Amino acid sequence: MKIKKNQVKTQFVFLLLFSLFFSFFISPQDTFAKTYKTKKVSKHYKKSKKPRRSYNPEKTKQEALQILNSSNANYLVRLANGEIDESDLIIDSLIVDPGEDPIELEYEDDKPVDLDVFRTMYISYLESGDYDEIGGTLSSGISKRKIMEVILNWLGTPYYFGGTTNRGIDCSAFTRQIFYSSAKVLLPRTAREQYQVGIPVKREKLEFGDLVFFHTRRHTYISHVGIYLGDNLFAHSSSRFGVTVSSLESKYYSSRFIGARRLTQRDLAIFGRD
């Protein structure tokens, strides 16, 4: 009987040792296998993630044009229904243009124009009538002289984001004011909408009175607008200088120029406010 009891004890001790051995040496391997498997799955999951979105200029341009067409159509409907009047020149719309980046402008606008010299020169031309560029009319029939007179009156006006008055004005409100004051033509409020007015013009074919457009902000394709004056100069409301005259030969504006539009008699019929 004692022998059997000893055998049972021996078997029990053996089983206990075997269990301990299994716990310490077999389980860790199993745990390691599970961990390795998890790491492999995690690595695979990271690979399967979608890549980060990148900026696609052409796609952004197409999306912008779709928005423009829709926005311009809404504007024309409002205009036809008599929902837009002269108060729009004072009460700003909700959508405004971001204009230029003042820091980039400071470093890249390398063709400054002396505004005082420019003003004196053009006033003398207007008074003498000797400057052909100011004489006559645009192809749309608007007086060039009248446009220049209005521009000269606005020179030096402070820039104000969303502004529409002589206390402060942004780029598209400025071009809008010039055509309204000189010809009672009420253009759409924003540069993006104005880019849909008139006919496209190549840079080498620019004429006095053409609207010139720029891509000055990374996330907005059409963000700035001015009025071409000739000799590679254009008038605009600059976020750094207010209403001023700048050169298209400047590194800043030359590299960001995206197109120009010329008003036609059809545009005068649509946007005219007789």
Image: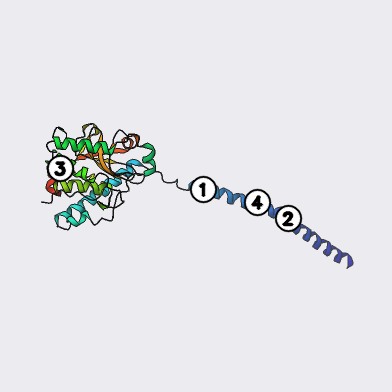
What type is the residue that disc 3 sits on? Answer: Lys
Circle 3 packing at 10 Å, graded few (<14), some (14-19), many (20+), is: some
Q: How far is mark 3 from mark 2, CA to CA?
A: 96 Å
Numbered circle sitting on residue 46: 1
Numbered circle sitting on residue 55: none
Label 1 or label 4, whichever comes before in sequence order: 4
Label 1 or label 2, whichever comes before in sequence order: 2
In this view, the mark in front (1 or 4):
1
In this view, the mark in front (3 or 4):
3
Q: Residue at x 20, y 46 (%)?
A: 178
Q: Nearer the viewer, residue 47 or 236?
A: 236
Look at mark 3 in the image and give the residue it sits on: 146
| SS for dot 3 | helix
Look at mark 4 in the image and give the residue it sits on: 32
| SS for dot 4 | helix
Left or right, 265 with respect to 219, comes to: left
Label 4 or label 2, whichever comes before in sequence order: 2
Q: How far is mark 1 from mark 2, CA to CA?
A: 33 Å
What type is the residue that disc 4 sits on? Answer: Phe
Label 3 or label 4, whichever comes before in sequence order: 4
Do tag 3 and tag 1 residues touch (Cβ < 8 Å)? no
Do tag 1 and tag 4 residues touch (Cβ < 8 Å)? no
Residue 10 is situated, as x and y percent measured from the top left of the image, at: 83, 61
| SS for dot 1 | helix
In this view, the mark in front (3 or 2):
3
Look at mark 2 in the image and give the residue it sits on: 24
